[in-house]
Amino acid sequence: MKARQEATNQNHIAAGLDPRQGSRTPYTVKNAMEDYLSAYKRRGGKSVREFHNTIMAHVLPELGPIRLDRLSRSRVTQWRDEVAAAAPRLRTRAGSPGGQKRRVIDPADHDAIRARRATANRVLSVLKAALNFAHHEGRVQTKAAWETVKPFREVNAPRIRHLTDDEVVRLVNACDADLRQIVVAGMLTGMRYGEITRLRAVDFGREAGIVTVTVSKSGKPRHIYLTDEGQAFFDQSTSGRPGSSLVFTRANGEAWGKSHQFRPLREACAAARIEPAISFHILRHTYASRLALAGTPMTVIAAQLGHTDTRMTERHYAHLTPNYVADVVRASFTRLGIVPASNVASLGVASARTR
């Protein structure tokens, strides 16, 4: 009986049908994405909500209804190119007249085009992961439709923006009181918006001069070492508060939500004459860039930011560190002993006039 059921399932799969739903239900890209997302959640995958939103926004509208066994390489390639060509989505209220709003891209803006292709690459990797999972689970017999579809090349070169000290002061002065608190916290710690808005008074260690991030993007807690200015700021911000209370709240006393900072920060940028307006994440880049410009080792910056190793840190900030490349090369490439030592002091290359 079991062997017969297995044979039936295999026949359904060969016919492009979903063995779980019966012989009349085709197994589609939508089914594959749903199955992969469920497995992703079960194994504790990161940023599940963002992952789900990516699938809903970029994959299902175009590819969702297609039977997996009828998906072709040309269709996946066409879809990848369409994602890259689409204008970036703007934040749009549900039920807004005209539907989803998008930002207009200047065809001459090469950085915007690069960014869209980078987005297409990220979404393609999500699609491939889900379809590979479907193949592994026996839902489709071949990976030919997507396996050879390549991402765009040379689109991930980082272009990291950071504020000057003068811009930081202008921005802080332009913020309303509640926004100013989290902006200053971001500038003095390099913490992410979500990490800052979840901070409790107990997370500030006065004696050690540290802030502890208990829930981070990597899933591991980390300690951020504060400067004297940072310690004074957090001492003032937590003074008299119960350990379980949020350090930073909105003017109405409520907690900061996921997107509450967007509009007030944009308005503060306009008042501070910072163009184009920055996202909160630029404060993190500014913090790390200031450390790099001061010659701080990449390992230290990585630890403060919560990077698991220095690869991401070096990719974004190494070019800002004075003599970084020279120091790494000279420290890593040890002496070979093939050049004889000399006691003669060099006077340099003689000029044509002295020859």
Image (cartoon, helix red, strand yellow):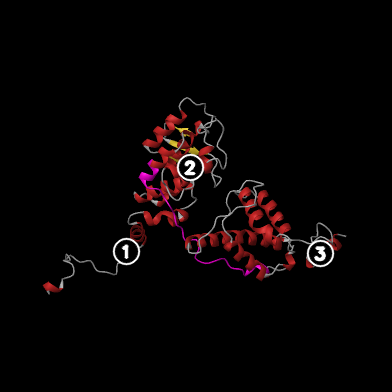
Question: Which residue is found at the position 45% from the left and 27% from the top?
Answer: 239
Question: Which residue is found at the position 83% from the left and 65% from the top?
Answer: 7
Residue 75 position by quadrant: bottom right
Whether 220 is among the magenta residues is no
Residue farthest to the top, as pictured: 240
Relative depth, front residue between 218 and 241 = 241
Alpha carbon of mark 2 to alpha carbon of mark 1: how far? 56 Å
Alpha carbon of mark 3 to alpha carbon of mark 1: how far? 65 Å
The crowding category of the residue bearing disc 1, from other C-alpha atoms within 10 Å (few below 14, some 14 to 19, many at least 20), is few
The kind of residue on which mark 3 rests is His
* Residue 12: mark: 3
Image side of residue 63 versus residue 153, left or right: right
Residue 9 position by quadrant: bottom right
The kind of residue on which mark 1 rests is Arg
Percent of width and height locating residue 36? 68, 55
Which quarter of the rendering shows the N terminus? bottom right
Among numbered discs 2 and 1, the one appearing first in the sequence? 2
- The reply to whether the C-beta atoms of the residues labelled 3 and 1 are less than 8 Å apart is no
Percent of width and height locating residue 79? 64, 65
Residue range highlighted in magenta: 145-169
Percent of width and height locating residue 76? 65, 66
Residue farthest to the left, as pictured: 354
Residue 140 appears in view: no
Residue assigned mark 2: 267
The kind of residue on which mark 2 rests is Glu
- Residue at disc 3, secondary structure: helix
- The reply to whether the C-beta atoms of the residues labelled 3 and 2 are less than 8 Å apart is no
Image side of residue 145 versus residue 300, left or right: right
